[in-house]
């Protein structure tokens, strides 16, 4: 996972994940400061699954020091 400055395009941070197939990322939690990241394991070979046993997991990353936008409610 990469954090990139949207204006300069400068790479700010790299977050290493314990699997290769990241499928989605979204901020959540009461203050929107937890990054939830999903991953996939579909169609991985047995060898790949042994290398990355966390494939298919949902991860909650705390302590990044950033937060996402508040969600909007709709009626």
Image (cartoon, rainbow, N blue to C red):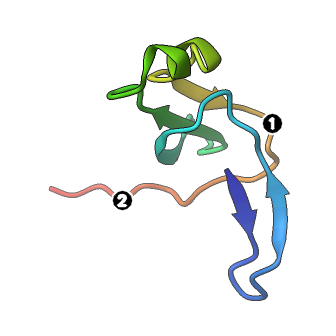
Q: Residue at x 62, y 42 (%)?
A: 31
Q: From what the image shows, is residue 42 above or below residue 34?
A: above
Q: Nearer the viewer, mark 1 or mark 2?
A: 1
**Residue 33 in which image quadrant:** top right
Residue 36, given in percent of the width and then of the height, sits at: 54, 36
Residue 14 has which mark? none
Q: Nearer the viewer, residue 61 or 67?
A: 61
Image coordinates of residue 6 in percent, x first then y, are 68, 80
| Residue at the extreme left of the image, as rendered | 75
Name the element at disc 1. loop
In the displayed structure, would residue 75 be above or below residue 27?
Answer: below
Q: In the rendered image, which residue does mark 2 sit on? A: 72
Q: Residue at x 83, y 57 (%)?
A: 13
Q: Is residue 29 left or right of residue 1?
A: left
CA–CA distance between discs 1 and 2?
A: 24 Å
Which residue, given by chain and number where applicable, does mark 1 sit on?
63
């Amino acid at each position: 996972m990469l954090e990139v400055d949207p204006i300069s395009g400068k790479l700010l941070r790299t977050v290493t994940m314990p699997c290769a197939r990241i499928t989605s990322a979204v901020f959540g939690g009461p203050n929107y400061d937890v990054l939830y990241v999903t991953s996939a394991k579909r169609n991985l070979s047995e060898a790949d699954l042994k290398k990355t046993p966390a494939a298919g997991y949902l991860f909650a990353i705390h302590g990044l020091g950033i937060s996402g936008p508040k969600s909007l409610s709709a009626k």
